[in-house]
Amino acid sequence: MDTILRLNGITKKYKKATVVDSFSLTAKRGHICGLIGPNGAGKTTIMKIMAGLTLQTSGELEFFGNKDNLDEERKRMSFMIESPVIDPLMTARENMEYVRIVRGIADKSKTDEILKLVGLADTGKKIAKNFSLGMKQRLGIGMSLITSTEFMVLDEPVNGLDPEGIVEVRNLLKKLAEEQNVTILISSHLLSELSELCTDFTIINHGKLIESFSAEELMIKCKSRISIKTDDINKTAAILEDKLGISEYKVIHNDEIHLYEMLDKPETVSRTIFENGLNITKFVIEGESLEEYYLSKVGDVNE
Amino acid sequence: MNKLVKAEWYRLRKSGSFLFYTVLVCVLCVAVALLGNRKFFENDLSTNAFSVLFGVGSFMYPVFISTMLCVVASMGHHSKVAYYEIMDGNKTSHIILSKHIVYLPIVLCLFLIPMISLFGYTCVKNGSGELIDKPIWFFVLFAAIILRIVIGAINIAMVLKKLVTCAIFSYARMFVEMLAILPFQIIGETQKNSDILKIADFLKDVTISFQIENLTTNCNDTRFIVMVITSAVLEIVFGYCMAYRSYKKKKFN
């Protein structure tokens, strides 16, 4: 079976507020899906609905092709929703052991194996209440890894981790997807990290699906441009329109022009600007990042 | 369900709060018995040890026990660790029943140990006094009341979920029950209205505190037996349904 997750028209309302509005999403086996949105967009609510912690107002969920017995399919999934769910009065080992027992895993060596994997094997008798944010995050990730899961749902798993920790988690998740065909749904505010990690992206804002696309489609969407700075941006824009007939451009913060035409003739553009008495301080051919694409999408909707 | 029982027992043992509350409750139970039942320590051989043991002072035992239980059971929700049981796709009935199975034997020991210890001490000191006729019904009704207290407290914790709310509700509940009877008692006596007095008597027959107080004197009374067992069954079933419904609504934030 190829499609692990199917969300169809999921809506969640709290009294008068619609937190999630007809949201749909699919995830295929072995893919890493990034869920991107600003704070309050509805990402965590969607993940809670998937985890069974809250019920949708309307819409359908399907896990592993099964719509009817979602609880049974949840045994094949693991979740880390919002902040890591840990008992503050227990040690790392005890928390991990608790989850091992809840999930019915007979192999006791799994506890130490996962603690070592997430770098918490040496915490000893220190209780989780005294852990740093990064340590709690590692423990939360470890607790979601302890089962041989087929589908992981991770809500901002790298939040609070140092750069080394972020790289470790990234590599670990990539390895799980590539070697064990684990499907991962991950949300994060670190778009640079998601762009390195994910095979698919979904943008959500105000509870609504804005756009879904694959990494390949993103490369096409994040089109190249010429970034130009001169000593008079408004005059530069007028010259480009007047002399070269260019219309596809944006003025950014009143001091930079992003030009989306004549990318194959940069010398013509620079010569035209120079010949009209302007000094060029920046002239670079570059591509749009996921962050810029996301901001352009979210910004468009907010307008 | 086996894994849920093991997990809950593991969490109780490892999470430091349980030991603290257990010791606290035992100390409180003994303190109340010492303060409220000084006849234990008078050298009076005619004292009915059982009836004194289950006197008004022992009303505090269920208050402390149920409050402790409620708080400990709700701590799983407070730290959200209880969410793992839900996210693992366990049946709601299994989640609820696993809690009942874990806490019931613990409370039986907690409840019985101070009481049997004190009773044993007074028997040695003062003699056993008059023994009850047909002690089997005494113990059956005692078990029914304990079940009602324990399962009621667990169900309250699973409905309310918030630690402080659970503690306040559980502690206040016994007092509110007694206070609820007062208006009927007062009005019935002042107006000499037998119907209202019957309501007051009926309410007394179904409240835990009065059932404990009257356990030794009425344990052979058929009506009392029926009331204790029926009220226990009804409260257990009602509480279970409320907990089940609360979990099914899935409002875990």
Image (cartoon, helix red, strand yellow):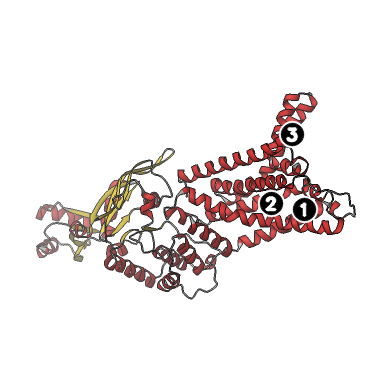
Chain to which mark 2 belongs: B
Foreground residue among A146 and B45: B45
Foreground residue among B85 and A104: A104
| Apparent side of residue B19 relative to residue A256 in the rendered image (left or right) | right
Q: Earlier in the sequence, mark 3 or mark 2?
A: 2
Separation of residues labelled 1 and 3 (CA atoms): 24 Å
Residue that badge 1 annotates: B32
Residue that badge 3 annotates: B182
Q: Amino acid at mark 3?
A: Leu
| Percent of width and height locating residue A119 | 43, 73
10 Å crowding of disc 3: few (<14), some (14-19), many (20+): some
| Percent of width and height locating residue B39 | 86, 51
| Apparent side of residue B162 relative to residue A75 in the rendered image (left or right) | right
Foreground residue among A192 and A114: A114
10 Å crowding of disc 1: few (<14), some (14-19), many (20+): some
**Residue B171 appears anywhere in the view:** no
Separation of residues labelled 2 and 1 (CA atoms): 10 Å
| Apparent side of residue B44 relative to residue B143 in the rendered image (left or right) | right
Do the residues under discs 2 and 1 have CB atoms within 8 angstroms?
yes
| Apparent side of residue B60 relative to residue A196 in the rendered image (left or right) | right
Q: Residue at (78%, 46%) from the top-left corner?
A: B132
Chain to which mark 1 belongs: B
For the image shown, how many numbered marks are present on the structure?
Answer: 3
Residue that badge 2 annotates: B64
**Residue B26 occupies quadrant:** bottom right
Q: Earlier in the sequence, mark 1 or mark 3?
A: 1
